[in-house]
Image: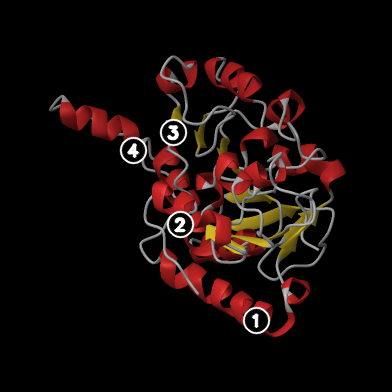
Amino acid sequence: MFVAATTIEEAYAHASKAEILAALAPRIPADLVATMPRLEWVHALTTGVDNLLMMPTLGADIIITNSRGIHGLQMSELAILQMLALARKFPEMLANQRQAKWERWPQPLLLDKTVCIVGLGVIAEALAARCRAFGMRVTGVSNGRQEVDGFDRIYRRADLKAAASEADFLVVVVPYSQETHHLINAEIFEAMKPSAYFINISRDGCVDEVTLLAHLRAGQIAGAALDVFEATPLPTDSPLWSQPNLILTPQIGGMSDIYARQALPIFISHLKAYAEGGAAALQNRVNRSGKPL
């Protein structure tokens, strides 16, 4: 039997009988999981499952699957939006509009600019294709893949400084792990050109926000755009809100107006596998280190 819970109260009402829980991972409370003694499988309608991996009420025997592979379209469109807005100083244009102020400045093109994408998964591939449509040179940083269609050059993670030094846009889409904690730090920002821009649409812990803010204030990089933050929602007293060369978006990178059409086919295929072979037959499984099995 399938039960759709449209409120958290409805979810609690059915929790004691449920063997499967499918939901957006960040919306799953630990208290709900604690009331599900028959739970065998949690399917996240998202890629990120960080909160599930740290959830003390989610037993080690419960399988976690996710919806990885569907977010390339929306994430890459957000990155393109941020690159255009940063380079053309679009927030300043909107501020001038509110003040009825007529001011013009040169409008740089993305043509022939170098974008370096840190992390070479599905999102990076989608972004690379769209960057090439603008005539950009595309480089990547990865320890796992050294040849990917659409990339002019791929650096090892140990060579991230060299990759960052030649980039006009440095875009982070790498998953968060102990290995990528503060992967983008003072050393990387100092390697970037003063005319370069930084964009993070991946996970908050990959970037040292304090160091980024210091480099923005000092003008050591031209600007940045962040869709994820070390504290979410971003506190109202955060100094990031008032930094003029920084664009903030409220963790919207994975959202789209066709999300159900993107995510449900994965869950349906998983349900068929579960019905035929039980939890052991599930694909897109995630282990407790956050990596796919």
Q: Position of residue 53 (x, y in %)?
A: 71, 45
Mark 4 — residue?
90
In the image as oriented, which residue stretches furthest toward the bottom? 276
Give the Cα separation between the discs numbered 2 and 3.
15 Å
Relative to 126, residue 289 above or below: above
Q: Nearer the viewer, residue 229 or 190?
A: 229
Q: Is residue 96 left or right of residue 28?
A: left
Q: Nearer the viewer, residue 290 or 278?
A: 278
**Mark 4 vs mark 3: which is more N-terminal?**
4
Mark 3 — residue?
248
**Mark 2 vs mark 1: which is more N-terminal?**
2
Q: Nearer the viewer, residue 180 or 49?
A: 49
Q: Residue at x 63, y 44 (%)?
A: 34
Amino acid type for the residue under numbered disc 1: Ala
Give the Cα separation between the discs numbered 4 and 3.
13 Å
Give the Cα separation between the discs numbered 3 and 1.
43 Å
Q: Secondary structure at mark 3?
A: strand
Q: Nearer the viewer, mark 2 or mark 1?
A: 1
Mark 1 — residue?
275
Mark 2 — residue?
77
In the image as oriented, which residue stretches furthest toward the left? 100
Q: Position of residue 270 (x, y in %)?
A: 63, 75
Amino acid type for the residue under numbered disc 2: Glu
**Mark 3 vs mark 1: which is more N-terminal?**
3
Q: Nearer the viewer, residue 176 or 218?
A: 176
Write down the quadrant of residue 261 in the picture.
Answer: bottom left
Q: Secondary structure at mark 1?
A: helix
